Image (tube, rainbow, N blue to C red):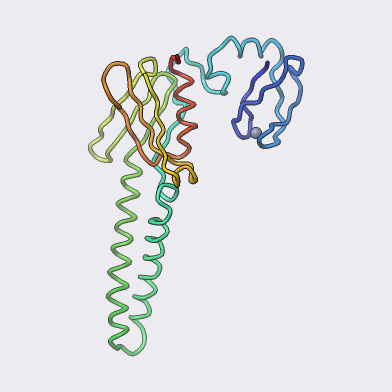
Amino acid sequence: MIRKPCDNCDRVIEVDDELAGAKVACEACGDINVMPAAGEAAAVAAGSRAAQLGLPPDEGPEQEVLKVRPAMLRARPLLFIGLVLLVVMGITGFAWGMYGMPNTVKTLAKFAGGIGAVVALGALGAWKMKALSAALEITNKRTVHRQGLLSKATSEVVHDNIRNVQVTQTFWQRLWNVGTLGLSSSGQDGIEIEISDIPRPERVREVIDAYRPLG
Ligand SMILES: [Zn+2]
């Protein structure tokens, strides 16, 4: 068997050995991929799982493989859309209340709209800052979790020590392809790194699994 990640969608394409060097359409997305020649295929098969997924090798200098930040819209679509709507409605109400002959309704629209827009904008801003302050950086050696904008707190796990990678998703999170990722190492008990609202959590797990000893 020859394996190669699709150039377009990263899904692994698997073909018989006689198709070495041939052009093969990806079953998932239809993209035409040139399969590795026999020699290269053997090298890939003998190499790490990382190579099979088209990722940088485990050996050699440390290099960044993947960096992910918490999602906002995908993590809480109703709240996100609700806040954006509140901003738009608030500004509209405020503008409407400002113009024309003042009356009780316009005064009310002005105040309620203004306060609503400011509160919703503040909530969106705080949420954005929180999302920007957290990141998971995966290299070919370790996974680093950064938290905080001003005072940075980092925790890291060396991939060789990872005992378990957990993805937890609610029904809605599965639909939107976000979830919580937890990493525990053999050094200590319990989960050491936990980061929520991560987009494509299964892909992140796949990448980490490629660099840690399995079984
Ligand atoms: Zn594809």
Q: Quadrant of residue 213?
A: top left
Q: Quadrant of residue 151?
A: top left
Point out residue 176 in the picture as x, y percentages from the top left corner.
48, 46
Q: Nearer the viewer, residue 138 or 186?
A: 186
Q: Quadrant of residue 94?
A: bottom left
Number of marks present in the image shown: 0
Instruction: Name the residue: 35% across, 49% down.
Output: 128
Quadrant of image for the C terminus: top left
Instruction: Name the residue: 67% across, 22% down.
Output: 14
Quadrant of image for the N terminus: top right
Rendered view: 163 above or below 90: above
Rendered view: 89 above or below 184: below
Point out residue 61 in the picture as x, y percentages from the top left corner.
44, 15
Point out residue 124 in the picture as x, y percentages from the top left corner.
34, 55
Instruction: Name the residue: 33% across, 23% down.
Output: 184
Q: Is residue 89 left or right of residue 13?
A: left
Q: Is residue 82 left or right of residue 53?
A: left
Q: Is residue 207 left or right of residue 82?
A: right
Q: Where's ligand 1: which quadrant?
A: top right
Q: Is residue 71 left or right of residue 29?
A: left
List the single residue furthest toward the left.
151
Instruction: Name the residue: 33% across, 20% down.
Output: 185
Point out residue 152 in the picture as x, y percentages from the top left corner.
25, 34
Rendered view: 85 above or below 136: below
